[in-house]
Image (spheres, helix red, strand yellow):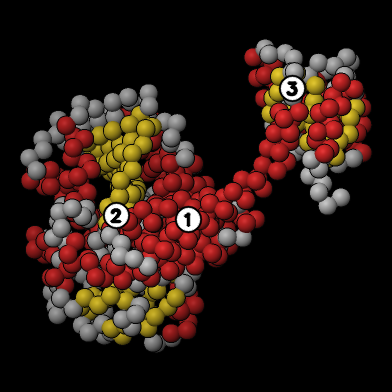
Amino acid sequence: MADDKGHILWVDDEVELLRPHILHLEQRGYRLSTVTNGEDALDFVREQPVDLILLDESMPGMGGLETLAAIKELHPAIPVVMVTKNEEEALMEEAIGEKISDYLTKPVNPSQILLVAKKVLQGKRIVGDRTAQDYIREFKDVMMKLQGSLDLDEWIEIYTKLVEWEIELDQHPQLGLQQTMADQRKECNQEFCKFVERNYRDWLDDEDVTLSPQVVDRFLIPHLKSQGPVFFFVIDCMRYDQWLVMEQHLRSLYTIEKDFYIGILPTATPYARNAIFSGYYPSEIERVFPDLWASKDDDDYSMNKYEKEFLEKLLERRRIRLRNDLRYIKIIDPEFGKQMVGNIASFIKNHLTAIVVNFVDMLAHSRSDSPILKEIAPDESAYRSLTNTWFTHSSLYSMFQQIARTPNATVVVTTDHGSVRCLRGTKVLGDRETSTNLRYKYGRNVKADSKHAMYIKDPAAYRLPKRGMTTNYIIAKEDHYFVYPTEYNKYLSYYRDSFQHGGMSLEELILPVITMKPRG
């Protein structure tokens, strides 16, 4: 029948007394079958498909729990709701252990039975329908806001809402809203890049805007006044959606507060992470450490080898005296991460431990280079799922679990930049000295279409290093990546659909700062 909402088998030795309940369900589109004992219930499910079983716990002969175990052995996926007069907690726990879907105590009324049937059989659809309605309403609200003049706080709010909706819609692929979501993200990124291009220089002198060099001052140093140990985790290349995937595993361990800051341009490790640890903009770092920018390429490892010294000098300038020496650790491979888990107990004695974790950045690069990982994570939703799989088996999660056993500890978690899924290539022109990065470039007279890139003629005005020559920078907007005209189509295809950083997008620039305190 067109309004068939599912086939329910009710197993109860007093089934005749349940006629009002059965009629109530049938009038609302459910098909009901009844049997009076466990043996008949097993025969029934062997022969006919059933969507839900309502199972009496106390029956002569084969009891409810025995019947439940036998049903689950035959059909593990069939949802079973236990109905019983017995309110003993031990019975409830045993039934839950057998993976029941719900537990009702007699006497039950028709509305209770209808509610549990709806929850089990139509719950996902009902939640999906409500989710779709709520998202469409939110979608219209965001699109209306894009027509007006937004400030930075409003952009952060829009971005966080977009991310939270993406994660919500991951649970409801049947709604078919993923493309709508992707189109909205694209339009928001287009407007956000215009906003950044207009305002970025002003932010450099605006004390109300927190950029990379202010992260330690505003989010870490205040916690150094506490008596407990402080852990400062910088997870390379972590986006807000990836943090939310990790956070779901940590809520039972910590109280969690979230703030946001804006990453500096370019959104690349040598610039952004050095800015975090030093409290300096790149041009200031160039003045203090001129050799740092001498090389042609921005290599993540050689150009971030002074992070401990940078942080020590920053704390010294702020006149922060630690109770013991700063402990700095950089985790760049899984084996070293496992060793750190074993040593984490000793870090509890330190006043401040700074830990850089490179795995998320490696995940992005590995997906770009590996056809298998691209097949496993073909889109944003699957990429979040891949992040979740990594995190649940990672040394990082193990470290968080161990630190949570120290009641007076403080954990500050942030990132140096995010990443964006690059889908559109744009031609770039430059000489042999031009840098090789895909999302930003510097060199003499380096050029690209202004629609796709922000042009920085005077690096000093943007507090960027001059690199010892007459240099200009270009920063890719939205999801564009730079490709030289030579063998253009080859490299256009090679780098398409890869996660990159260094450019200008919501994902790369709006970055979370998390403060966690152990619950207990």
Q: Answer left or right for 144 relative to 33.
A: left
Query: Mark 2 is on which residue type?
Result: Asp
Pinpoint residue 68: horizontal percent, then vertical percent. 78, 26
Tell me if I can see residue 170 in this picture: no
Dot 2: element: helix
Query: Mark 1 is on which residue type?
Result: Glu
Mark 1 Cα shell of 10 Å, populated few (<14), some (14-19), many (≥20): some
Q: Quadrant of residue 401?
A: top left
Which residue does the image show at 81% across and 43% down from the upper left? 29
Q: Answer left or right for 204 relative to 439.
A: left
Which residue does the image show at 28% across and 60% down from the upper left? 151
Tell me if I can see residue 430 in this picture: yes
Which one is in front, 133 or 231?
133
56 above or below 366? above
| Residue occupied by mark 1 | 138
| Residue occupied by mark 2 | 153
Query: Mark 3 is on which residue type?
Result: Val
